[in-house]
Amino acid sequence: MAENLENINPDIVHDATGTYCPIPITELAKVVKQAKTGQIIELQADDEGAIQDVPAWCETTGNEYLGYIDEDGLLRFFVRKTQE
């Protein structure tokens, strides 16, 4: 799965590193709200809690969770906006 994620060119990249729950999710919500349907958002975070929080948020909101890549502690989450 990670191999495919490395080939994704996100439409929006948002850096939430240095923040902790719930900030990465509130930041993601703001960015997704501004994105257009179908756009892919990359959320960068270093809070390991986001590994559970991002997919749970996507399930709750109906947006598509594509997965994440861990690059030595930098977590890169990929979400496709599917809901207006």
Image (cartoon, rainbow, N blue to C red):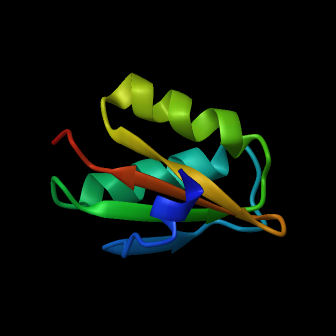
Taking 82 as reference, is 38 above or below it? below
Taking 20 as reference, is 63 above or below it? above
Residue at far top of view:
60
Taking 17 as reference, is 1 above or below it? above
The image quadrant where one finds the C terminus is top left
Q: Residue at x 40, y 51 (%)?
A: 79
Residue 14 at x, y = what percent? 50, 71
15 with respect to 35 (left or right): right
Q: Residue 54 occupies which quadrant of the picture?
A: top right
51 with respect to 11 (left or right): right
Q: Residue at x 49, y 32 (%)?
A: 57
Residue 43 at x, y = what percent? 53, 62
78 with respect to 36 (left or right): right
Residue at far right of view:
72
Q: How many marks do you count on the picture?
A: 0
Taking 59 as reference, is 37 above or below it? below
8 with respect to 14 (left or right): left
Q: Residue 44 occupies which quadrant of the picture?
A: bottom right
Q: Residue at x 69, y 41 (%)?
A: 51
Residue 82 at x, y = what percent? 21, 42
Residue 55 at x, y = what percent? 53, 35
Q: Residue at x 46, y 56 (%)?
A: 78
Q: Nearer the viewer, residue 67 or 41?
A: 67
